[in-house]
């Protein structure tokens, strides 16, 4: 049974969209069959938003069957037909931008100005990019590489893609996983995080409205342990794409390899923020605060470890703490809010645990507590700066996933780059310097999938996003992502109609 909860209509105008359930299979909403329910909670107020029936294995089976049935027709569509459908999809997303922005703010606690200016426009731009990319899927030019044989390479869709998305960017992660896959001719079953399913469901509904055939995009809203594992291990799923923690990514890989399917993993991050002594200090301070606090720090590319060359270290700590203290924490729907709550009280308490334990071995310069002043019911936490922690300490090595920046000094350039690389992760990093040679060295030697110079956090549809080391493998966005959702076939044919006889004679002799 579905309960609309207490969310007011101005905070969640799309509430009535889910009266028929929170599973989207073969173009329609249905109720989950697990026998259990989950309640989406507004993390800013603690109020219930929506109670829905969780997906179970039977729902996953139904979604995979719908995707499998839709695959031959969608794969056979011309690139132009898929491109036209995605252009229409982009237009529908743009028409409903405000509705998406409000729903994303409500379920995640993101400031509305962030979802309006970043999450939703980025999603629309992704749809437009892959609409164009659909017409540019190329193999390799034909050529005669072996006698009288002509060879060429085809890129073909893989089949049904089972994707698992996290709760920190539900709308954008749905886009990053679904758009390249369907542009290449695949069909998709996506499992969003059970605490943030709303915009993924709205995304699939918008695709249907744009004319994308039923079954091409399916959503199963359930737990990772039940719906997620069943989807990853499903024998009719040809590829798994997962974004989430490294620990869960290892389990996904274990389950996926049992059926020898293609695997794409975007996992945890612990991005270094490397400030050399010739950097523009004020620019670096502002970059650190923006980079550390984006999405309340719940971003795998967020600046989490600032390494500052010793001549600038104390000034950086002082200025960063002062700037953090000006950040306005509050209701995501209030115009002046800079920082909303974390996604849940569970996540807030997890972040607080890291900070509380750090007090025994480091200096908490600012923050380190939940704010008061009418915000007690929400999952809020003040922007926090920690200084003087050891390189091997928990707050330096572990992914906190909250509004916490740790600052450490270094002396030589060699030491700074070594410390930047000294975690298991390698998703993103930034380096701050006016010296082009220092900056260029940082881009070469820092082991991360993205290295920004004198900036931290911007991403664009045309460029790839993905990690090194324990941050996973595979790329989101860009043409690199598009190609990952294809398989390569070598086609070779005889131009003379006698080559097969010659080959037989060479191997077996005259007979």
Image (spheres, grey):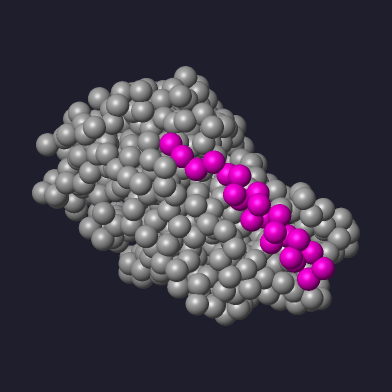
Magenta part of the protein: which range? 310-331
Q: Position of residue 198 (x, y in %)?
A: 33, 37
**Where is residue 230, by image quadrant?**
bottom left
Main SS, magenta region, reads: helix
On whether residue 311 falls in the magenta region, the answer is: yes
**Where is residue 188, by image quadrant?**
top left
Residue under the image location 47 percent in, 19 percent down: 95
Q: Is residue 146 visible?
A: no
| Vertical relation: 389 (above or below) 346 | below
**Where is residue 303, by image quadrant?**
bottom right
Q: Position of residue 267 (x, y in %)?
A: 49, 61
Q: Position of residue 235 (x, y in %)?
A: 28, 58
Compared across the picture, whether 101 is left or right of 226 comes to right
**As rendered, which of 280 and 325 lies closer to the eye?**
325
**As rendered, which of 222 and 230 lies closer to the eye?**
222
Which of the image's four quarters has the N terminus? top left
Residue under the image location 49 percent in, 60 percent down: 368
Residue under the image location 64 percent in, 42 percent down: 460
Residue under the image location 50 percent in, 77 percent down: 360
On whether residue 369 falls in the magenta region, the answer is: no
Q: Is residue 296 visible?
A: yes
Compared across the picture, whether 323 is left or right of 115 comes to right
| Vertical relation: 75 (above or below) 101 | below
**As rendered, which of 132 and 169 lies closer to the eye?**
169
């Amino acid at each position: 049974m579905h309960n609309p909860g207490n969310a007011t209509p101005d905070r969640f105008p799309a509430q009535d969209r889910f009266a028929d359930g929170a599973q989207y299979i073969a173009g329609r909403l249905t109720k989950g069959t697990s026998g259990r329910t989950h309640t989406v909670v507004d993390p800013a107020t603690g109020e219930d938003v929506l109670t829905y029936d969780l997906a179970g294995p039977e729902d996953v089976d139904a979604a995979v069957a719908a995707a499998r049935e839709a695959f031959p027709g969608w794969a056979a569509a011309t690139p132009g037909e898929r491109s036209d459908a995605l252009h229409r999809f982009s237009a529908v997303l743009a028409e409903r931008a405000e509705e998406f922005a409000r729903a994303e703010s409500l379920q995640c606690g993101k400031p509305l100005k962030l979802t309006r200016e970043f999450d939703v426009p980025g999603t629309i731009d992704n749809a437009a990019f892959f609409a164009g990319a659909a017409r540019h899927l190329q193999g390799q030019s034909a050529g005669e590489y072996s006698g009288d044989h002509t060879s060429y390479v085809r890129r073909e869709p893989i089949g049904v893609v089972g994707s698992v998305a996290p709760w920190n960017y539900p709308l954008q992660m749905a886009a990053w996983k679904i758009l390249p896959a369907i542009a290449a001719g695949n069909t998709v079953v996506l499992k969003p995080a059970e605490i943030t399913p709303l915009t993924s469901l709205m995304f699939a509904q918008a695709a249907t409205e744009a004319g994308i055939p039923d079954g091409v995009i399916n959503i199963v809203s359930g737990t990772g342990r039940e719906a997620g594992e069943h989807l990853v291990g499903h024998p009719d799923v040809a590829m798994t794409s997962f974004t989430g923690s490294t620990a869960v990514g290892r389990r996904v890989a274990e389950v996926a390899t049992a059926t020898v399917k293609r695997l794409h993993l975007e996992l945890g991050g612990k991005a270094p923020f490397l400030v050399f002594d010739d950097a523009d200090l004020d620019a670096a301070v502002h970059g650190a605060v923006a980079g550390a606090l984006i999405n309340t720090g719940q971003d795998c590319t967020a600046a989490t470890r600032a390494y500052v060359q010793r001549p600038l270290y104390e000034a950086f700590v002082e200025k960063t703490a002062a700037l953090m203290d000006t950040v306005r924490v509050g209701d995501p729907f209030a115009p002046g809010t800079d920082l909303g709550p974390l996604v849940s009280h569970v996540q807030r308490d997890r972040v607080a645990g890291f900070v509380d334990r750090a007090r025994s071995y480091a200096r908490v310069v600012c923050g380190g507590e939940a704010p008061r002043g009418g915000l007690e019911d929400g999952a809020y936490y003040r922007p926090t700066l920690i200084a003087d922690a050891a390189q091997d300490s928990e707050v330096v090595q572990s992914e906190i996933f909250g509004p916490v920046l740790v600052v450490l000094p270094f002396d030589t350039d060699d030491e700074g780059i070594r410390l930047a690389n000294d975690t298991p992760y390698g998703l993103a990093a930034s380096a701050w310097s006016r010296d082009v040679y220092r900056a260029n060295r940082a881009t070469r030697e820092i082991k991360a999938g993205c290295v920004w110079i004198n900036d931290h956090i911007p991403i664009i549809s045309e460029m790839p996003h993905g990690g090194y080391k324990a941050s996973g493998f595979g790329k989101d966005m860009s043409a690199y992502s598009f190609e990952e959702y294809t398989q390569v076939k070598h086609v070779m044919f005889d131009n003379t109609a006698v080559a097969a006889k010659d080959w037989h004679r060479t191997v077996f002799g005259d007979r």
